[in-house]
């Protein structure tokens, strides 16, 4: 897992200075330049605000903030591909240009990534230059929704500080699917199941250990920085699951042996269920409202939103501490449900994070308090016009 640089040096804070889109979502073409640390986009629903955040999220590992297939991001009635270019400022060697997109080659769609206009194999390399965290309205039901949503949320937290985590999670999912097929088709062939379960155990313990380390680090950061008077309450977080207890109580090799034995002993049950019932794929992230000492799912809707914001802010600080890069923070429709006092407190907390912040909201009045310290833009029908820039104030 990535650690912060030695010494007391401040995290680097790369900022997106130019975003260029071609045939991306509703944008045939766009060239957007920013100067401020805070960027706010306002406009009606469907105007294209979230599309801009999604374009930025492509420079993180994974499937972006909508979890969409790249083929779905190409503009309707376009050529079938798209390109997103991002210029970062804040690197010691000067600006860095990054590219992500989809190209049609002989009728087939191929994902493409570039760094300073040179091809690279994947978005993983971008983690050396930028880290990205986000919060979207789809996450508002995180505490009341299914455990799978919280696992995906947790894995994004881990991936922001550990660039290898995504490969481990994907490898585990493939290995579990393979075991499920073996249980269905070749249950009696022990040698094949033994081999599959050996691979699963190694990957599962690595995934569970990475999650545990991130949760422990985040919990420790929250404990040392929490403010009982903050409008964004602190969260009490922990992992729940049989494999999580196994990892907490045993060294890695011993945990692998124990998990392999569990898989072997539960083959009949898993075959009947059609899936592997014990493992990281069954874990849950337990979240409690710290000041109220109650489960997050029992808090009010407003309290849950404030708690989620507080958790994302804490994670952004953890990313900066561990990676040495203050992350780019993407907040979709962030301010609509907060009263003016909490909204001002949010803007102050975001300003203190160190990294660049991109926000969206339907009503430009939501961002009135940012006049003079943010780049404010109006978005309408795939077009963007400046409302106020820092240098204009």
Image (cartoon, grey):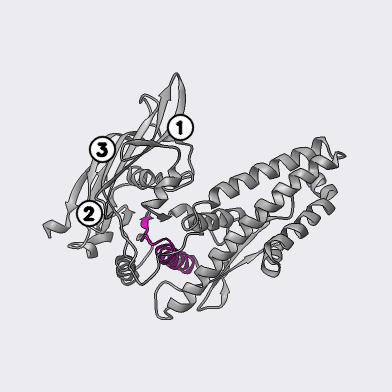
Image quadrant for the C terminus? bottom left
User: Which disc is residue 71 wearing?
Assistant: 1
Q: Tell me the element at label 1.
A: helix
Mark 3 closeness class: few <14, some 14–19, many ≥20 residues within 10 Å: some
Does the magenta segment cover residue 381? Answer: no
**Disc on the earlier residue, 1 or 2:** 1
Q: Which residue is mark 2?
A: 376
User: Which disc is residue 30 wearing?
Assistant: 3
- Left or right for 71, reference 278: left
User: Which disc is residue 390 wearing?
Assistant: none
Mark 2 closeness class: few <14, some 14–19, many ≥20 residues within 10 Å: many
Q: Which residues are magenta?
A: 303-330
**Which one is closest to the eye, mark 2 or mark 3?**
3
Residue 243: image quadrant is bottom right
* Secondary structure mostly taken by the magenta-highlighted segment of the chain: helix
Identity of the residue drawn at 76% across and 58% down: 257
- Left or right for 365, reference 262: left
Identity of the residue drawn at 13% across and 57% down: 391
Q: Where does the image place residue 283, in percent across and percent down from the top left?
A: 65, 59
State the CA–CA distance, disc 2 to disc 3. Answer: 16 Å
- Considering depth in this image, is 330 or 315 the residue closer to the camera? 315
State the CA–CA distance, disc 3 to disc 1. Answer: 19 Å
């Amino acid at each position: 897992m990535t650690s912060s640089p030695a010494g007391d040096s401040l995290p680097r804070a790369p900022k997106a200075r130019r975003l260029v889109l071609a045939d991306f979502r509703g944008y045939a073409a766009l060239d957007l330049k920013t100067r401020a640390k805070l960027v706010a986009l306002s406009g009606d629903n469907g105007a294209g605000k979230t599309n801009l955040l999604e374009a930025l999220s492509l420079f993180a590992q994974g499937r972006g903030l909508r979890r969409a297939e790249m083929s779905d991001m190409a503009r309707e009635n376009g050529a079938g591909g798209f390109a997103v270019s991002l210029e970062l400022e804040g690197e010691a060697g000067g600006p860095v240009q990054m590219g992500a997109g989809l190209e049609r080659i002989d009728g087939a769609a191929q994902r493409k990534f570039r760094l300073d206009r040179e091809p690279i194999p994947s978005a993983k390399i971008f983690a050396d230059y930028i880290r990205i965290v986000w919060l979207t309205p789809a996450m508002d039901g995180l505490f009341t929704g299914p455990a799978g949503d919280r696992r995906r949320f947790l894995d994004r937290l881990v991936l922001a500080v550990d660039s290898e985590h995504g490969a481990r999670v994907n490898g585990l999912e493939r290995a579990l699917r393979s075991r499920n097929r073996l249980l269905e088709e070749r249950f009696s062939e022990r040698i094949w199941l033994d081999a599959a379960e050996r691979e699963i155990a190694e990957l599962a313990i690595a995934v569970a250990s990475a999650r545990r380390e991130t949760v422990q680090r985040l919990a420790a950061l929250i404990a040392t920085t929490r403010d009982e008077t903050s409008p964004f309450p602190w969260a009490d977080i922990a992992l729940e699951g049989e494999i999580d207890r196994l990892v907490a109580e045993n060294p890695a090799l011993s945990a692998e042996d124990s998990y392999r034995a569990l898989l072997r002993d539960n083959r009949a049950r898993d075959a009947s269920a059609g899936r592997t019932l014990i493992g990281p794929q069954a874990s849950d992230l337990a979240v409690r409202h710290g000041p109220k000492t109650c489960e997050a799912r029992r808090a009010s809707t407003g309290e849950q939103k404030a708690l989620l914001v507080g958790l994302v802010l804490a994670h952004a600080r953890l990313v900066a501490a561990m990676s040495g890069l203050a992350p780019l923070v993407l907040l979709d429709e962030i301010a609509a449900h907060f009263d003016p006092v909490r909204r001002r407190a949010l803007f102050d907390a975001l300003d203190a994070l160190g990294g660049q912040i991109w926000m969206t909201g339907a009503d430009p009045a939501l961002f009135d308090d940012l006049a003079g310290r943010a780049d404010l833009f109006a978005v309408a029908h795939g077009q963007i016009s400046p409302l106020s820039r820092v240098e204009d104030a």
